[in-house]
Amino acid sequence: MARSLFGTDGIRGVAGVAPLDHKTARAVGAALGQWVIESKRNRADPSAQVVIGQVVIGMDTRESGPWLAAEVASGLAWRGVKAEFAGVTTTPGVAYLAKNGPFAAGVMISASHNPYQDNGIKLLGHAGYKLPDDQEERLETEIFRLLEQGLDLAPSKLTVNAGLDRAYTDHLAATLPGGLGGLRLVVDCANGSASKLAPELFTRLGAEVHPIHCAPDGRNINLNCGSLHLDVLQSAVLAQKADAGVAFDGDADRALFVARSGKIIDGDAVLFLMARYLKAPLVVATVMSNLGLEIALRKHGIAMLRTPVGDKYVLEEMLRQNAALGGEQSGHVIFHQYATTGDGMLTALRVFEVMRASGSGLDELTAELQVYPQRLVNVRVRERKSLAEMPAVISEIRAAEKSFGDTGRVVVRFSGTEPLARVMVEGPDLERVETAAQRIADRIRSELGGEESAQTFR
C-alpha cells in the first residue's frame, strides 16, 4: 500500500490536525499495542526479559506533547499494554530505554527541529531501532482500520518516572570515565529535550558549562536557537572564551559544534575527526555530505559509502557493512558501539573526548577538511511528482552534472517531513554552484507551482 502516515522519521504534522489529532494518536497507540502483543507471540526466544504489556513513552518540550502522549497511552491501555512515561527526554534516550529496559517498544513524541506548532510520533522496536518500512506499513493498515471503526477512549493519566532519565544519563556518563575536567563549554539546548539533561551531564563530568536556551515554555523550542541557528552560540563561545560550543535540536538526536575561533563544525567535520581518531576503515554518510569529506577521508585510507538522506538509512547501511561510525551533515552521528540511533549528547561526549585526548581544539582537528562550495535551495511545493515526470528538470540536472564532471555533485530530492523539494549543488566554484542550483530550483518551481523558502550557502 502507499505510505501516507509515516514519513522518513515517523508521523509528523501540525499538532491537533490530522494526522496529529487526538483520534489518530489514540489509534497509533492501539495499533502499536496490537503489534507488541503479536510480536511477543512470534518472538523466537520466549524467555527474553521483556514485559509483554509495557512500552516506554518520552516527549520533547512542545505544549502538545502531554496530550499526544496521553492519547497514545490510552490506545495502548485499550490493548492491555501499559505505558511507562519518561516525560521530557531525548529521542536517543527513548531508544536506549527501549533496548535496555523491560520494554517491548518505545514511543517518542517530537517533531525534532520543526517549530512548536508541529509534533510527531516516532516508534521504536525493542532492539532500539526505528521500525522498518514494512512494519510501519502494517501499522498504517491497522491505524486506518481503527479510525474507521472509531475509538471512544479517555486519555490516560501519566506520571513521570524520573528513574528512566537517570538510567539513560548514567549510561552516557559511563562511556567517558575520564570525564571532561578542564573544558569550558557553551551548551545550546534549543529549549528542547536536552535543556535539563545536557548541562547536568557535562557538569557532572567535570566541565565548566555555560548553558543557553535551556528554559522551555512549550512554544520556544527551536525558536532562533539550537542547531538550526548557530549565530547565538558562535557569539557566546567567543564572549565566554570557551573551548567549544555545542548546539542540539529539539529532541537532541543531533549536535553541531562551534570551535574556539567561532568556526562551525558540522556533521561532516565530526565524521572526519572521529574517523581519524577511531581509525575507522569505513564511514557511512548520505548523499548530502560534502565531496570534501570523501576526499579528506580517502587521503587517510578511509572509505566512504553514501545512502539516501535519513539516519535510519545510514544505520541500515552501517549494519550491512558492520560499520561503527556513520552520520549526516546535519549532525545526526551514530556510534554503533554505544547507540542504535543518532544521539546529540553522546556525539558531544565523543568529540570532547578527542579534544582532551589530543590536546587540540576543533579548529586544529578539522583543519585538513577542505569543504567544497555548496548551495541548498528549498522550494515549497503544492504537490510531489517523480523526477521522471519532469523532463525539463531532469534536463537541467543533467546539464549541471555534465558541467561539473567529477568535481561536483547535484542532488535533488523531496523532504520526507515537509512539502519541500530540496536542491543541493556543490562544486569547486561558488558562482557556478549558485547558478546551477537556481536554474534547477526555477524549473521545479515552474513545474510544481512552489516558491523558494530557504537558501543555504557553504
Image (cartoon, rainbow, N blue to C red):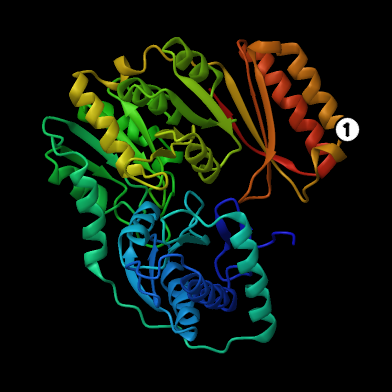
Give the percent coordinates (x, y) of residue 241: 21, 26
Which residue carries the number 1 mark? 391
Q: How many marks?
A: 1
Give the residue drawn at x 85%, y 25%: 395
Q: Is residue 99 above or below residue 434?
A: below
Q: Please tell me whether mark 1 sits on a helix, a strand or a loop.
A: helix
Q: Nearer the viewer, residue 267 or 190?
A: 267
Amino acid type of the residue that numbered disc 1 sits on in the rendered structure: Pro
Compare residues 305 and 368 and report the one nearer the observer. 305
Above or below residue 92? Residue 44 is below
Quadrant for the N terminus, please: bottom right
Q: Is residue 281 above or below residue 335?
A: above
Report which quarter residue 99 is drawn in. Answer: bottom left
Could you say which is closer to the camera, residue 332 or residue 183? 332
Q: Is residue 239 visible?
A: no
Percent from the top left, x then y, of residue 113? 48, 48
Q: Residue at position x 63%, y 74% from top?
A: 143
Drawn side of residue 288 relative to residue 274, left or right: right
Q: Looking at the image, which residue is at 40% across and 54% down?
A: 91
Residue 144, horizontal then vertical, whole percent:
67, 74
Left or right, 59 with respect to 395, comes to: left
Q: How far across and how far down the image is residue 331, in percent? A: 43, 36
Which quadrant of the view contains residue 364? top left
**In this rendering, position of residue 73 left or right of residue 238:** right
Can residue 384 be seen here? yes
- Give whichever of 249, 278 is nearer the camera: 278
Q: Callout 1 environment at 10 Å: few (<14), some (14 to 19), or many (20+)?
A: few
